[in-house]
Image (cartoon, rainbow, N blue to C red):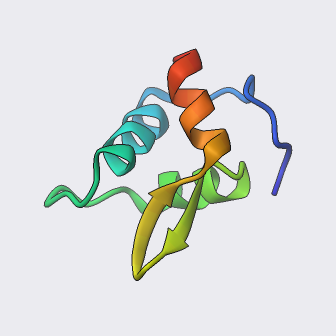
Amino acid sequence: MENPDLDAPLTHSEFESLRSIARGPTLRPIPDDSVSRLKKLGYIDNKRGGLSVTDLGALRIKKGA
């Protein structure tokens, strides 16, 4: 994990990917680079065979882009 920080800069694509993962399974693929970065930041994790938002990720969504 890079830094469990709610102020880490995210691109528009990364933030939209985070929000998409929070909504649940999607037909739209999530870019691999977004998945990698969001995992490093601790905002998402693999759970039950798919991606899910962590508590830190949920706080980041509430904070906004």
Residue farthest top in this picture: 64
Q: Does residue 49 appear to the left or right of 10 in the view shown? A: left
Q: Does residue 3 appear to the left or right of 57 in the view shown? A: right
Q: Residue at x 37, y 51 (%)?
A: 21
Q: Quadrant of the N terminus?
A: bottom right
In front of the other: 48 or 29: 48
Q: Is residue 13 above or below residue 1?
A: above
Q: Is residue 3 visible?
A: yes
In front of the other: 13 or 57: 57
In front of the other: 24 or 36: 24
x, y percentage for residue 38?
Answer: 59, 50
Q: Residue at x 63, y 59 (%)?
A: 39
x, y percentage for residue 60?
Answer: 60, 29
Q: Residue at x 46, y 33 (%)?
A: 15
Q: Residue at x 48, y 39 (%)?
A: 14
Q: Does residue 4 appear to the left or right of 65 in the view shown? A: right
x, y percentage for residue 19?
Answer: 38, 37
Q: Is residue 28 above or below residue 49?
A: above
Q: Is residue 51 above or below residue 5?
A: below
Residue 13 in which image quadrant:
top left
Residue 10 in which image quadrant:
top right
